[in-house]
Amino acid sequence: MSQDHSRYSRLANITKMINMKLDLREVMEQVTLAISEEIMRCDSVGIYLPQPDGTFRGYVGKPEIINGRTLDMHVIDTDYDLLAKEVIETKKTIYIPDTSKDNRPDPRAVEAFKIKSLLALPISYEQELFGLVFLFDYGIPMNLTDDEIQAVEAYVNMAAVAIQNATNLTKKEKLLNEKQLLLDVSRDLSMYTTLQECFDSCFFYIQRVLDNPNIGVHLMDPIAQKRIRPAKLSKDSDWTEEEWLEPHKEMNFDENTDALVMEVLETKNYIYVPDVFTDSRPDHNLCRNFGIYGLVMFPIITMGEVLGQISVVTLEEKAPLYTESQLQLTQSIIDTMASALSHLLYMEKQDIIIEERTSEVLEKNKELQHVVSELQHLSREKELILNSAGEGIFGLDLHRNITFCNPAGATMLGYESESELIGKSVHVIMNGQSMERKEIASDETDSYFEEYKVFYRKDHSTFPVEYVTAHIKENSEIVGEVITFKDISQRKQLEEKIKYYAYFDSLTDLPNRVLLMDRITQGLKYAKKNDEKAAILFLDLDRFKVVNDSLGHSYGDILLQEVASRLMTCVPEGATVSRQGGDEFMIFLPLVKEESDILKVIKCIDAVFEKPFQFQQHEMYIKTSIGISLFPENGESAEVLIKNADTAMYKSKERPGTSFHFFSEEMDIRSYETIRIENDLYRAIEKDELYLHYQPQIDYKTGQIVGVEALLRWNHPEHGFIPPDRFIPLAEETGLIVPIGEWVLRTACAQMKQWYDSGLKLPRLSVNLSVHQFEHQELFNTIECILEETGLAPEYLELELTENLIVKNTVQTLQTMEKLNASGIKIAIDDFGTGYSSLGYLRNLPISKLKIDKSFVDLMVQDDAAITNTIITLAQNLRLEVIAEGVETKEQADYLLQQDCFLMQGYYFSKPIPPEEIYTKYA
């Protein structure tokens, strides 16, 4: 008992760390410590996490140094370690008590560490593998018992949960980081005025995402549009500029001859080739000349026009593998750059034209009229470029009066024509911002950048902008300014949205857990300082899963929004209502004078939940379970108070309807007992603690037995008989219901065949199937194997499914039911009438029987028999059998018989009894 108590304490501590801390390494260290304390004979325990190359590298362990090497220097390669390979493939624990008789472990490690025995376990959660755990000795076998192995598995399960939590958090952080990165890219590019700056910024962010400096840009020739030319190489590349340009001079490299370039330009999508020599599209000679082994090509597109492409190449033989999210983020960076690049390329094209024309004038000394004509042509082209720019551009003279404005700028400022602005003071746009200088003066810098300013439209409304101001010079003298600006309203809205949803729930607009924790922390400080009380209410919606499963997730979202709205009407000023996720809500009451303050809130919640929730044609009553913890009686920190309120909430779930419960110390003990029972459930099958009783099903009209229902029981070695309603929900939550359900089915079928061979020929055996079992892909094959193993004919077997399961009406559900029916197995709907099915489609399902729930039988005689009568009539019209369960009195049995319901089961006829009593009583 002392060892068990220590084990459960360690499990509880790890669970607490998972719920309260985000540091994965700290949790993993606690797990390895717990394992080493549990298995004292173990010389080494280590946790190994997967690497991109398929190996597993040491992460944490005890001891931290083995044979002079730290744990992160130890690598498990499944090409050599067949034991690790088998654990990964099967996701099952493997214990090798004697390595000399087993060739699966890596012989190099066995020899190096003198390993005599070895225990390997997978760290997995819902079929996803997160890592491996290895325990071994240095010379003396560990001689592990089943109980010790199962204890280690319990700790490893905790590790899986911690890794899953860390993975989810990492994904959220990654999404925020990517959004911030794109905002940084956009901000940086808006400040640059040269191609060099534009490319350097783009290279910096691409290298940051792909961790590869070998980046080059190829652009469409501004003059010969059909030819693509090398433009710029990253300064951090492993090539020199000359090494990069030389092969381009020797080889004909353009969009018409290179298949990859042609495909990128035509499809306008990026292309990823991890290995160029196993792909037919790349030019292999070109790749050999450059020393390229892998590459990615990204198109540069703006306004539907391809400006060129950016190549990221790998010069090592073992090319790194990029993820789809990395490639998509890189393309987003390039798309952001494209707009700025387009404007700069237009300017470069202009410069090229000016250079060519000037050269012609100097070389040929043409007549003055020709020169004037050329300049006029250039002026018109400049005007076209100015008019085509997507950003707003206007000029100022020395007195800060507007001298010109492009159409895009006039439109953004609310003017029908740019001519309306000519001659006006810049005050009409800036309204006094940055106007310290009345006149333009000489400055050391030629331009400056302003972010998050506002400009005024013609109608005096404002919009946020970022703009660049540059001097206009003539003969080195400043003669004015040119201002280029961009409307950043959408970006500001996006930034505000990101900031908002960092603290508020996106579905209900209630404060999320981050904001709630801050408010609780501040509220508790105030309460402690002023000797005040506070309270936390933890709410969980009852039967919310029914809404999602029967009506769909969109209706579930509508329900959550309506619940949030109703809860807000019940709290006093200064209180916080928060959604924690799923169907869980929390209310923080910072100032509680007496218990009646809390009861007033709960009474209001009870009242608003009395009203039905409307979903178009649907109407549903939803109740809530509430747990309450008080400051300072039940804890002095937010984490402890939330945990205790959560515990109290589960206590309130034991009562029907909207209920509440205050936390007490006994609940902590109860929570600890639940963890113990959950862990013991893992061992129940192996230790033969589970057994079956059978309840007879009677034809009341003839008095004959027409079948039996198999009912699961658990006799715990310490706690004795544990009610099914206590351990079956735990089995559902942990996934153990699948192997337990398979055991029930196999045991019941074997017992039915044994009765049959002994002369007791019962017509039917009923076995319940859970939702998890029914949705398992191997269900039909498993049932076929069990019937073949036990020799029981399928027509003797009847499977009972809950109404909520068939309500889903998925393709897989219908296909499985049809296969079972075709094989001769009967299907009954258990607890009929408690779900929300449309009775009309029952005729299309391959079922043979409806089972009236005990709750309707209880109400039948003394209160209301309408539901029971309706179910019986429905079954008769659909030519289905109908059976009533929970019949406990003669009065109930007689009434059912009058309504032509002959089949019954319940304590009036017999309680569930052992198989030998069934044989003695009915043989």
Image: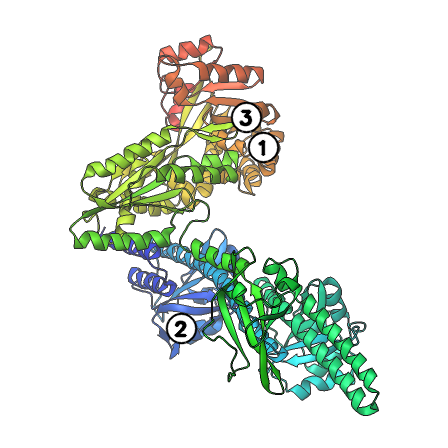
Which image quadrant for residue 858? Answer: top left
- Mark 1 lies on residue: 817
Which image quadrant for residue 42? Answer: bottom left
> Residue 36's x, y, as percent?
31, 63
- Mark 2 lies on residue: 71
Placement of 273 over or under 93, stated as above or below? below
**Residue type at numbered disc 3:** Ser
Of callouts 3 and 2, the N-terminal one: 2
- Alpha-carbon neighbours of circle 1 within 10 Å: few (<14), some, or many (≥20)? some
Q: Secondary structure at mark 3?
A: loop
Residue 524 located left or right of residue 97: left
**Residue 657 appears in the figure:** no
Placement of 716 over or under 302, stated as above or below? above
Placement of 670 over or under 848, stated as above or below? below
Placement of 174 over or under 704, stated as above or below? below
User: Marks 3/2: CA distance?
Assistant: 60 Å
Q: Nearer the viewer, mark 3 or mark 1?
A: 3
Q: Secondary structure at mark 1?
A: helix
- Alpha-carbon neighbours of circle 2 within 10 Å: few (<14), some, or many (≥20)? many
**Residue type at numbered disc 2:** Leu
**Residue type at numbered disc 1:** Met
Which image quadrant for residue 309? Answer: bottom right
- Alpha-carbon neighbours of circle 3 within 10 Å: few (<14), some, or many (≥20)? few
- Mark 3 lies on residue: 838
Of callouts 3 and 1, the N-terminal one: 1
